[in-house]
Amino acid sequence: MFGSVEAMLSASADKPLWRAVLEDDCQDRDADPAASLARMGRLWQAMKESLEEYDPARRSASGLSGGQGARMADLADPICGSFVQEVASVALKLGEHNACMGRIVAAPTAGACGVLPAVLIPLQRREGLSDETMVECLYVSAGFGQVIAQRASISGAEGGCQAEVGSASAMAAAGVLADLLQGRENPYAALFDPARTVLRPQLLANGLEAVLNLLRPTAPRCPHMGCALRWNGAERSWDCPCHGSRFGEDGALIDNPATDDKQ
């Protein structure tokens, strides 16, 4: 098992990175390459089947999770574009599928189960890639996940959502970088480009909306930073458009970053 990225890259000096991770897996588990490939292939198929099993009508035991992935997928003319819309909807669908006790692949954890499929499944659809290529991507992701697990943490209980979702995002990014290092074009490259910019027209619109919400004189206020709350008739909740806090009809806190009930 690789303990550093340096060791992983050194092992791949004369072979593709995914092959180096596969050989390390075989040595670690005393397995042959065919068995390792078959095992990773089953995990890839399970990821795709989990998405197919998603039911937008299902709700979690608490009633808070379910249906949002389908709403994202059906959104007309999204400001993020159709491709990022699909990425977001897949991530939501699998997160909700997990909350509703559906079958998922915990890669690297159950809490982050939507990240890798959200990157890889739309990528396969858009580029027409084979299942064999996607399995290679999973090996690269797994190698980087091993390093994170050994040198930091993938536990949400220990490191919060950065440990789970942050690790999964790094694993997904690793698959993109593997393409770049081998000279292959990847549609996600711009998302991870250090020179990318967050300056978008929507950012200005969001900032203006936040200021207007702060200035509204009579609206109920979010205890987090004072933004005006909006009534969400579909969910029967008071929602903060500034930072996402939510409150029940009685003002009880449903979702952070607020820490107190609505007054």
Image: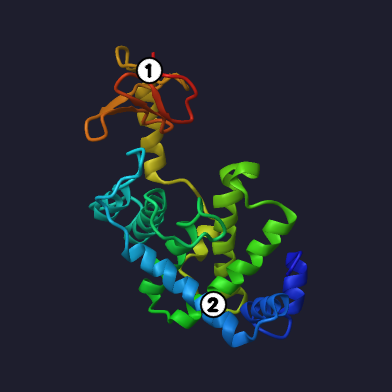
In terms of image quadrants, where is residue 93? Answer: bottom left
- The residue located at (32%, 63%) in the rendering is 53
Between marks 1 and 2, how big is the CA–CA gap? Answer: 52 Å
Above or below, 173 against 23 in this view is above
Task: Classify 10 Å Cα crowding around label 1: few (below 14), some (14-19), many (20 and above).
Answer: many
Of the numbered discs in the image, which one, if any, rests on residue 221?
1
- In the picture provided, is 212 more to the left or to the right than 56? right
Label tally: 2
Q: Position of residue 242 (x, y in %)?
A: 41, 30
Mark 1 in CB contact with mark 2 (< 8 angstroms)? no
Q: Amino acid at mark 1?
A: Arg
The answer to whether residue 202 is above or below residue 181 is above
Label 1 element class: loop
Q: Position of residue 155 (x, y in %)?
A: 62, 49
* Label 1 or label 2, whichever comes before in sequence order: 2
Q: Which mark is on residue 39?
A: 2
Q: Secondary structure at mark 2?
A: helix
